[in-house]
Amino acid sequence: ENKDEEKQKVYLLIYRNAQRILRLINQLMDIRKIDKGLMTVKFSETDMVEFIDDLMQTFTYQANKRNIKFTFSHTEKQLKTWIDLNNFDKVLVNIFSNAFKFTPDNGEITITLRTGKDDKKPNTPLFDFFEIIIADTGTGIEEDKIEKIFERFYQIHNIESQSGIGTGIGLHLARSLVELQHGIIYARNRIDRQGSEFIIRLP
């Protein structure tokens, strides 16, 4: 039985590494398409509340296993908007994955969906906007690194483990995909407690 368990662990490790390599290849291909101006954007009407709810189910097992409180706050029962479903899925999966990566066991990750108006940007697509805020109770981001984390191949530094994690591609791709949809994405450290917030704002 022990040998079988060891085999299963090895197979699982191989599978996870294969998935990671495949994900990396797909991300590099997407970046190449964007660089060459070949990335197609296909907008469709989407209920953002339902979309986020569905996507969160992907992370429920991990949240339960690590006792992470994973919640979704929204004022509207429905929020109809036009987005590129496939590409926006990649953006949120990337940000959610990072939140889980940097949030310790027994921590919290909160997703907030809200709408608003930006009076500083009249007659622009982002005058009327909706935004998604992904807040975690992780290690936070060093202040001088907040803008750099979106640069290509820049690795987020994990303060607790003193190591760089990831490939440095995911956040760069996320920003590129958000900008393709006339939106913005940025990060900041939380004021109320330890952790960081990623804000995605789209028209």
Image (cartoon, rainbow, N blue to C red):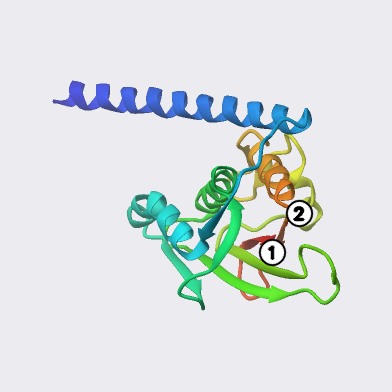
Q: Which residue is mark 2?
A: 146
Could you say whether the residue bearing mark 1 is in a helix, strand or loop? Answer: strand
Report the side of 177 relative to 65 (left or right). right
Contact, mark 1 vs mark 2 (Cβ under 8 Å): yes
Q: Residue at x 68, y 40 (%)?
A: 173
Q: Quadrant of the C terminus?
A: bottom right
How much space separates mark 1 and mark 2, taking CA atoms? 9 Å
- Place residue 69 in its image quadrant: bottom left
Mark 2 is on which residue type? Answer: Ile
- Label 1: how many residues lie within 10 Å, few (<14), some (14-19) or many (20+)? many
Looking at the image, residue 81 lies above or below residue 182: below
- Label 2: how many residues lie within 10 Å, few (<14), some (14-19) or many (20+)? some
Q: Which residue is mark 1?
A: 189
Q: Nearer the viewer, residue 116 or 155?
A: 116
Report the side of 73 relative to 123 (left or right). left
Q: Position of residue 197 (x, y in %)?
A: 64, 62
Looking at the image, residue 182 lies above or below residue 162: below
Q: What number is the disc on residue 79?
A: none
- Place residue 138 in its image quadrant: bottom right
Q: Residue at x 64, y 67 (%)?
A: 130
Q: Position of residue 172 (x, y in %)?
A: 71, 41
Looking at the image, residue 161 lies above or below residue 8: below
Report the side of 102 relative to 150 (left or right). left
